[in-house]
């Protein structure tokens, strides 16, 4: 089993920055890829960024050039640096992890094995 705990959310004005963290514990050696998703009120959960064990990354078009996903393997921690935030980035942000390389990219929401509880990001105009 793997446990994921997100942190770093908060309230920020439009144009501001936040860095989210996701600390993994448990059987972390099984993880091949980690992802960030978000869900705004009344909307479906959507993929934001993904990274695999080789360091390959993928981003949703809506965040390309503004968000950066990274990981510190020594600390078993995933990060999401969010710059130039917009009100439409307001959402609950979730960390996910999976041991299957086939699940790393493609935003396979229903196939990802481990999820955190989420951290709220609110961007005001």
Image (cartoon, rainbow, N blue to C red):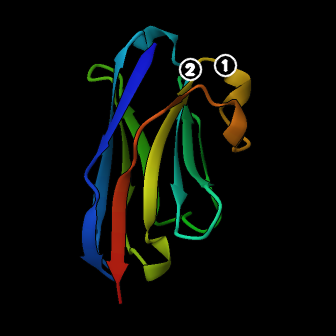
Is 96 above or below relative to 91? Answer: above
- Residue drawn at x 60%, y 68% is 62
Q: Position of residue 80 (x, y in %)?
A: 39, 50
Characterize the local packing of mark 1: few (<14), some (14-19) or many (20 or more) Cα atoms within 10 angstroms.
some
Gap between marks 1 and 2 measured at Cα: 6 Å
List the residue tagged with mark 1: 100
Q: Position of residue 125 (x, y in %)?
A: 35, 90
- Residue drawn at x 43%, y 71% is 90
- The picture quadrant where one finds residue 104 is top right
List the residue tagged with mark 2: 32
- Residue drawn at x 59%, y 70% is 42
Q: Secondary structure at mark 2?
A: loop
Q: Position of residue 30 (x, y in %)?
A: 51, 10
Q: Secondary structure at mark 1?
A: loop
Nearer-N-terminus badge (1/2): 2
- Residue furthest to the bottom in view is 125
Asked if the residue under mark 2 is in contact with the one under mark 1, i.e. CB atoms within 8 Å, the reply is yes
* 84 sits to left or right of 50: left
Nearer to the camera, 72 or 34: 34
Is 42 above or below relative to 73? Answer: below
């Amino acid at each position: 089993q793997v446990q994921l705990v997100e942190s770093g959310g908060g309230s920020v004005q439009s144009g501001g920055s936040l860095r989210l963290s996701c600390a993994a514990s448990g059987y972390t050696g099984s993880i091949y890829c980690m992802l960030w998703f978000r869900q705004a009120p009344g909307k479906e959960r959507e993929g934001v960024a993904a990274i695999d064990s080789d360091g390959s990354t993928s981003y949703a078009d809506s965040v390309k050039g503004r968000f950066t996903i990274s990981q510190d393997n020594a600390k078993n921690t995933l990060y999401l640096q969010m710059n130039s935030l917009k009100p439409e980035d307001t959402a609950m942000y979730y960390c996910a992890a999976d041991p299957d390389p086939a699940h790393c990219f493609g935003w396979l929401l229903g196939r990802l094995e481990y999820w955190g509880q989420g951290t709220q990001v609110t961007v005001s105009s």
